[in-house]
Structures are given as C-alpha cells and as structure tokens.
Amino acid sequence: MDNSGPHTSSPGPQNASNKDNRHIIHPNSQLLIRLPTKEVRNIRIDASPGEKSINLGKFGSLKQKYLVGQPYGLSYEVQNDKTLVILPPRRLEELEETGATNELIVDGNEFVQPLTYTEIDALKKSGLHASEIIKRQIESHANFELKTEYSKDKYRKRKQAKFAKEITVLEPSLFNVTSYFFEKDPAKIMHLRIDTLGQMANLANLRPGGRYIVVDAVSGLLVATALERLGGEGRVLYMSESDTPPQFQALDLLNMPESHISILKQLDWAASDEDHEPIRAPFETDTGEYRSIGQKERYEKRKLALEAHAQLREEFFAGEWDGLLIAAQYEPFSIVQRLTPYLAGSATITIYSPFLQILSEAQAKMRPLPAYLSPSITEAWLRQYQVLPGRTHPMMSMTGGGGYILHAIHVYDDPTASSAMAGLRQRKRQQRERNASRAAEKSKNKAVLEANQDVEMLSEVDK
Amino acid sequence: MVPVTVTPGLEINNRFGVFNHTDLIGLPYGTKVSSRNGRGFVYVLRPTPELWTLSLPHRTQILYIADIAFIISCLNIRPGSSVIEAGTGSGSFSHSVARTIGPSGRLHSYEFHEERATKARDEFALHGMTMVELSHRNVCQQGFALLDEADAVFLDLPAPWEAVPHAKLAMKKNRVTHICCFSPCIEQVLRTVNALNRSGFTDLTMYETLLRPHEVHQVPKLVSIDSIVEQVKLHEIKKEQRRLQQVEASDKKRNNLKRKREQTEEGGPDLDLGTGDQKRRRDLDASHPSTAVDVDSTVTKHTLDPSSPPLNHKEARLAALATSTPMSKPMPEVRGHTSYLTFATLLPALNNEMVMEKNDDPDNVGARWEDTETTDAFDQLLASIPEDELDRVLAGQALADG
C-alpha cells in the first residue's frame, strides 16, 4: 500500500495472503469471543503467541496457541490448565410437558436456595466442574421439582451462564462484527444495524470491480463493507478530514487479507477542491544536493507520497465513480452536491442516518434537482423470533430501529426534453377549456331554467 | 420501468413516447432521452439486480430487496463464495447473489419446474451470468449432487425440511457455513427448525424483515393555539362591533325618520331607544382603545382566518413554502409480511482429537482443517445416509466432475 492509503492498526493476520484461509485463526488475528453470558469480547492473538494467555476473568484463561490453527465458529470449554476442549454442536432439546404449574411457588421466597455465595465459591475453588455445581444447586433448591419444565430449563441456563466456562469464537463476518458494535458501542457506528448495512450494500450495487466513494463516520464499517463486497477488485475511495490514516476498528476485526485492503485509498476533503493547491513540505532541496543519506531518503519518500497524492486526485477528478455511500456526521446534501460532478451516469447514491429528519431535509433538497432520480427514504424493520421447540414467539425485546436510508440514482438531465405528463397536461388543459366553454353555454341555459324554477317555487311559497 | 436489450431497428413505444433502440447506442448510462415525437422522455439506466427485481417477468412469487439484502448479509455471501439456491423461481435472488459473489464465485441454482428452469437459464445467459450453474432438478428428492462445496445455502421451497439433509452434504465441512430457509408460514418454520436441529445445525435464529418507505411532505409551520385564542377573542370583539354599528345605523335611520316625522308633525318626546347599547359601545372602545388596528394586523398574520385579505394564490404558496419544513411519514399502505427467514449454522466437522493440548505443534496448525477429506464425524454422517441415496449423490458428483 502506498502512502496515500490508510493503514489498519494491526499489520493484519499472517498467512492471510491466501484468500481461502480466512476461516482459520492465525497469529495476529482479531477474535470475537462469546462468553456464557452472551457477552462478546474482542481479543487479538499475538503475532507470536508462544505461551501467552487470554484472560477471560471468571470464565478462566487460556493459552492463545491452542486457538491458532482452529477454524472459526467452534465452542470450547476452558480447562483449569489453560487448555481447551472442543464442545460438540449443541442441539435444541424438546421439553416434556409435566403438568406442573407455578400454583404452589411462593414469589420472592429467599430461602429456596440454601447454598450460600461462600459455599459456591468453595465448590468452584475445589475445581468442581460447572455441571456438578449446578447439579448441587438444583439438589438443594427446595422448590425445583415444583417448577414447570420450561422454568427448570431457564434456571439451568441461567446457572450455566454463571458457572460454565464455555466460549465460542465467532467467525469474523460483517454480520458478527456489526452486531458486536451494535451491542457493545452503538454510538461508534451511529446505531447502524446489520440489516440496514446490508441494504446499503445492495442499494449501492457494491460489486467486484466497481469504484465507490465512501464517507464513513462509523468506525470504518462502511469502508469495510465496501472492501468486503469488492473482494480486492476495483476502488474504494475514503474521504477523510485529515491526511493522517484513520483508525478503522471495524475493518481490523474482519481479518481481511492485504489484497482486499490494497484497493482502499484516502483523499482529504481539501484535495476534493479542484482549485486547491495542496501545501506540502518541499521534496527537493534548492541546491539539488542532500546533507545526508537520511535527508535524501526522507525527501524521496516525500516525493513519492506527493506523486501518489497527485495521481489519486487525478483519479478522483476523472470521475465516473459507480456509487457514493455516506454515513457521516455532516449535512448529507452538501456532500452529495460536492461529489455529484464525479459520479457516473446511473451511479447510486446511498445515505445512512439514524435520524429521519436529516434525510427528509436532504431528500427535499434533492427532489427538485434533475440530477437525482427518485430520491426515496426507507426504514429497515427487523423482528427476531425465539425458535425453541414448542416455544416459538417474537423476542420479548427488540431493537427500536435500525436507522434510515436515502437512496437515489444519478442521471444526466436534458432540459429540452418535455415530460409526457406535461404534454398530457397541456392536452388536458385544452380539453378542459373546450369543455368549460361548452359547459358555460350549457349552464347559461340551465341558469335561466333554474331561475324560472326558483320563481315558480317562490310563487308557490307566496301562495 | 422496463428491461430493454438494445437491438438496432426495434422501437420502444409506451405512454412516455416512442424511442428507437438505435438512438440509445453510444449514450452514457443515466441519460435522459427525449421521445421522438418530443412528448415525454425516459431515463436509460444501468441494469442492477435491484432494478431487475422491480422489472423482471414474474413466473413465481419473488424476493424483494429487504429479504435479499438481509439474507446475503446473514449468510456471509461475498466475492468468491460458493452458494446454493433452490428453487430458482423468477431469478430475483439469483441476480443479487451473482452480483455479490462476482466472477470468482459460484451459484448452484436448482429449479424443479422445467419451463421455469429453461427461461431462467436463458435469462442468466443473456445477462452474462457465467458464475451461475442452473440445474433442472427436484432437490427434495434427488439432492444437490454436490459434496463439501457450498459456503451458503438458500432454500425457497414449499417443504425446505425435505432438502435440509441433502443441503448438509453439499455444504463445506472445514469451516462455518450457513443456511437460510424462506417460508411464509409459521408451520413451515416449525418443521424446518425441527429438521435443521435433527441434522446437527446450530445457532438457529429466525427473523422477519421489512422495509418501511417514508414519504416527505412540505409541512407549513404550525400555528400556536395561543394565537387562535387571541383570534377568537378578536373575532368576538369584531362581531360585537359590527352588531353595535348595525344598531347605531338602524337607530340613526329611525331617528332620521322620527325627526322627519317631528319636522312635519312638530312636538312629542325624544325617545332614545339605543341608550344601553351605546353605553356598551363606549365601554368596549375604552377597554380596547386600539381594537380596530389589532384586528387588522392579527388577521393578516393568520392565513387560517377566512376573513384575511385574499393573498394571490402564488404568493400564498410561496409564503407557505418559506415557513414550511420537510417532514416524513410512513407510506399509508405497506407490505406487512413476506416470509420468515430461518437461519442456522453448520459448524466445522469435529474429529476425535478433542483436547487441543495434543495439537500444539506450531508447524502443523490449521493443517487438519485445510483438507476436506473425511473426518470421523463426516464418516458417521455418510454412514447415516441410505445407500441408494448416497450412490445417487456420488453419481451426481461424478457427473458434475466429468
């Protein structure tokens, strides 16, 4: 990657040059680990894992080397000696109806669970397996047998989340990475939900070989989506506030091979101004001679960077970009307006905002302009269901919203073209006028008639 | 919107005018093209899977962008992916997948209806979708004729549960793979969940997704109710003033008449009938010294008042626009349900080496997962398949290889 491209904070996983190797954990890989509590934690494998450990607090700690070489997606039980045991896939179990109800269960009874915190702690310290601790808890639970099977199942699951040392290494997919941010720190990705992101990718027509401009204030999630969908072919141009490489946390988590990232270039907003002369330090000494080898190298590096920057600007100004994707903290229409000259005909414009109002205003500005075909706003709606045998229903809580998308297609106007509707309207107007004059004639006659009738009616009243 | 294959000599003739295909050649995509008779125009757009979905010839119920985009995200479909789809239907989903997997990917599409299969095959060829391989085949009965091939499977079938075991065979075993079953009815979901669970799929999730379109309106700035309170009060005053004026006028008239009569008849007492009202009028004027001015300025401020001086139509519209803001509301009629999307994951097949301790040879890491040769779990899986079925699958595989 040359100097004008952004750098990810990590050098990227080793062996990642092989495209078909992304399903395996490598040294340097970023991991998303799901804990028994369903919390997902981000951990990076060291460049040389050696005997280094990953500490998961009360869920134990494990040696990194045991994860290296494993495929993503598996679940493990963390052992006390920091090794791992792979857990076989767990099936959903059907629960047998027993006819038990909560009729006899007293709410808020504190004395049903006689195992105290210290006793449980002692059991844990004795190295007893989680399943054994839960079994003892159930045995000492006064009302356990009174519970319904569903309630028993819930109890077991709750205890498992507390004591089991089971972890799952999630695959670094856009779905998992987006979900991770959405749950952990939604503000970082402007509350952009995965279904909305997926719709943006489709609406923008992201495809291998395409060239796209991306304005990203969502920790690189939009840039990462574009890179993932381009698969190393085409161009992703990231518009930035400064010329320093941005921190793309979301991109790091995807463990993308270098070949995918190499098509990403960064252009600062000042450089998007055609009249702007970038101010840069000199890359040649006045005399053409250098004080030292170090200075010469520095100047040569500068020169390369400057050339790359100039070349990128040329590429940008040459235009014909296939799409513009925006998830930014700036007024979206100002971005669209500034970049429209560089968009190809039929290019897609796809804007995200967590606020409907922002997009409504942008839409109102775009609608009268002939360069934007049918700017429209959509909101993604997503409902998840619990699918346990005999217990299928929508989740009791759901996300309130996934944000809004404003989408339009860039077109070239032809001011001389008159719309069929205009022609139709003209014909209709003529027709109306003809009808009106005819109707006027008629109504004149009718008015006379009615007047006569009125007179007749009046005369009747008089009588 | 109509899909058009540019063919010199042909014409497009619709309510937007007459267009000659030859005139379109050489134009950049996105061009607004005026009709030959000067009445009406069209935009010539670059075809995308999204536009195709909106204009394709329907042979079946089709998937729309909300479901398509979500499924592609959840199944982690990306350039180079190998994807299975059954059935092909009208090809709405196929086009999106083909675009996303690109030339380096592979879409194995299955359709059991022969005529639909032929039509879809022709369409794919016409659209240059070389990454799609379409088979006329009933996957519920005959399976997919693939082994360890797919990264993702999408089943849009009346009985997806029948195809689930076959799908498992066709999916890669050395990595996480995903399946999605698309069914409109909850009863289908329950059977599918059961089949997925029994076949060893995990992480079963189910979603419904929709797109809510919003329409933007220019809404004039809303008037505060306080001003209406004042307006009604002023109206009251105005009304009373008008009444008093009428009383005064009629008094005057009567007095005039009376004076006339008195002038002719001479004498008689002066009967002042309007005294009470005249007093009230004086009081009213005293308590609202500038009533008349207020009334006028207030009514011009509120266009709601029917008695306001009539602005001309254009002026009124401009005035309203100047104070109006763009506001959105959901479209009045929207799609309420498409289908339930049931997702499941197939985890990498395990071998018997359960404790990782035994596998800390740093040179050998990952080696076990790179090959897709048989593992114990896979052997068990194969063993559980009826022999004739396995023969058929392997025969199909041989055919595909050959």
Image: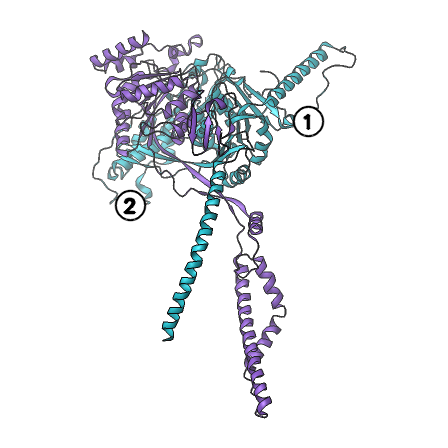
Chain colours: A cyan, B purple
Q: Position of residue A423 (x, y in %)?
A: 49, 38
Q: Chain of mark 2?
A: A
Kindly indicate whether the residues beneath marks 2 and 1 are on one polypeptide chain.
yes
Q: Identify the image quadrant of the C terminus of chain B.
A: top left
Could you say which is closer to the camera, residue A205 or residue B316?
B316
Whether residue A5 is visible here, answered yes or no, is: yes
**Residue at point 46%, 54% (across, down):** A440
Camera-nearest label, 2 or 1: 1
Q: Position of residue A128 (x, y in %)?
A: 34, 25
Residue under numbered circle 1: A275
Count residues near mark 2 (Cα–Cα under 10 Å), then give few for <14, some for 14-19, many for 20+.
few
Q: Position of residue B221 (x, y in %)?
A: 54, 50
Q: How many marks?
A: 2
- Mark 2 secondary-structure assignment: loop
Q: Is residue A87 left or right of residue B289?
A: left
* First in residue order: circle 2 vs circle 1: 2
Residue under numbered circle 2: A106
Q: Is residue B192 left or right of residue A412?
A: left
Q: Amino acid at mark 2?
A: Val
